[in-house]
Image (spheres, rainbow, N blue to C red):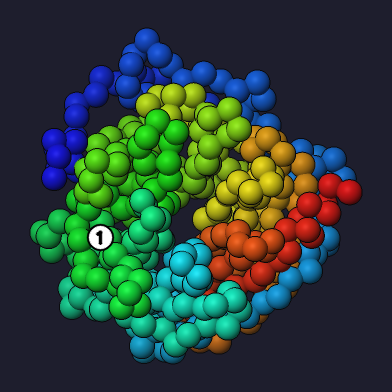
Amino acid sequence: MSDRSATAPRQAKPRSFVTHIGIIAVAFGSVSCAAQLPDVPLASMFAVSSLEQDPDKIDWNQLQELPGETRSIIRGVMGESGHMHHPAITHFNGLFFAAWNDGYTHENRAGQRVRFATSRDGLEWSEPAELTGRHPRRGYTAGGFWIRSGEMYALAALRDTRDVGITGEDPLLLAYHWDREQGRFGDAQVIARNFFAQNVPQATGDGEWMILGKSGVGAWSGLKMAKGGAKAIDAWEIRALPGMDKLEEPEWYRLPNGHIVAHFRTRGPGRLARSYSSDHGETWTEPIITNFPEASARHHGLRLSSGLYVLMVNPNPTTLRVPLSVALSRDGLVYDRIANLRAVGEPPRMGNISRPPGFNYMRGCEHDAFLYVIYSVNQEDIGITRVALAALHGLYR
């Protein structure tokens, strides 16, 4: 492991400033090179002219519904896989791959594991296979798929759990290499310690990869950034982002000008927050609460091959993750179209267990003129919906 590894991060000099959400944020990198603001105000993220300007007055279930095909990938079984969450999807070497974590009955309990399935068409899926197996005192969480230098890795976190508590063992970020010749994942490789990845590594434009996440300890620990991954799969510089402790589950993508915008889940306001970097993630603007409504859940944004940006989100801040919607933006900053992918929830199958109902923690990928969106249904099952890219672009006609 190099001297830029997760266990030996460089000590950067912070610059502090008060944010618009009443906390302190710290920018890393050159103190004299603060992140440049975009032309569009960061707070102005939602601008759908056909809807009420006050998002709290919108009837979200009455949005236009996109035509799509929906399938079940796997249904949970109480006592074995009764809690299913954190799904991810990608396409690699002629196959779709889906991964998720499941536990016996509840989230973040000892024995939570990661499994995966494959598909030729993204609709009909194989029986699930084990990625991690189970740990008797700790739990695994799915971390998505990373395609690096023509090879694919499935990521998973290994952390302490709510029922067992502190074990004294390091939280680990693990990578499993896909052996395309043998058609299986290899053994786990530790690529970082005390870092819980909340999105897969993406290229920043300066030859490095970047992941936003948090500490592997605690449910609402402060956010962190890992940058590196180019010289070696385990060569990361991990930096704390002090002051972002009231934000969660960051997502980011690059804009046409090469700059980066990050979106965050917030606790309570019912709106997304976001921050901006003009130097490949070295420095960031202060996080700003936007006007984009959101149900305090996970969301996912990506740029399509056409240049259009899609944001998969639960936009109704007054309900628990229904509907599942897709918002569109031409510039990646202002979202001016939105439609529902799934507007009607499914009744829970497993009784009164504490878990948010609805379509949870969606992820998407583009392949062959379709957007494939994977999600947890009531945190009991894993579902997928395929929508034609033509239907998305049709929202601008």
Q: Nearer the viewer, residue 307 or 110?
A: 307
- Residue 113 coordinates in the image, percent (x, y): 31, 75
The quadrant in which residue 330 appears is top right
Q: In this orientation, does residue 317 appear?
A: no
- Up-down relation of residue 232 to residue 101 (above or below): above
Rendered residue at 71%/42% (across/down): 329
Q: Quadrant of residue 186?
A: bottom left
Please give the residue where the numbered disc 1 appears in the rendered image: 174
Q: Position of residue 121 (x, y in %)?
A: 59, 76
146 or 93: nearer the eye? 93
Amino acid type of the residue tagged 1 in the rendering? Leu
Residue 386 x %, y %: 67, 69
Image point 89% across, 49% down: which residue?
397
Q: Is residue 286 above or below residue 388?
A: above
- Regarding mark 1 in the picture, which secondary structure is present there? strand
How far across and down, in percent of the image, does residue 159 sit? Answer: 24, 62
Looking at the image, residue 40 lies above or below residue 229: above
Q: Quadrant of residue 244?
A: top left
From the viewer's perspective, is residue 228 above or below residue 152? above
Q: Residue at x 24, y 41 (%)?
A: 231
In the depicted view, which residue is nearer to us: 369 or 201? 369
Q: Residue at x 33, y 24 (%)?
A: 28
Q: In the shown orientation, is residue 211 left or right of residue 392?
A: left
- The answer, for residue 392, to whether it is visible in the render is yes
> Crowding near pointer 1: few (<14 within 10 Å), some, many (20+)?
many
Left or right? Give the position of 380 relative to 168: right
Which residue, as the protein is rendered here, is positioned at the far left? 168
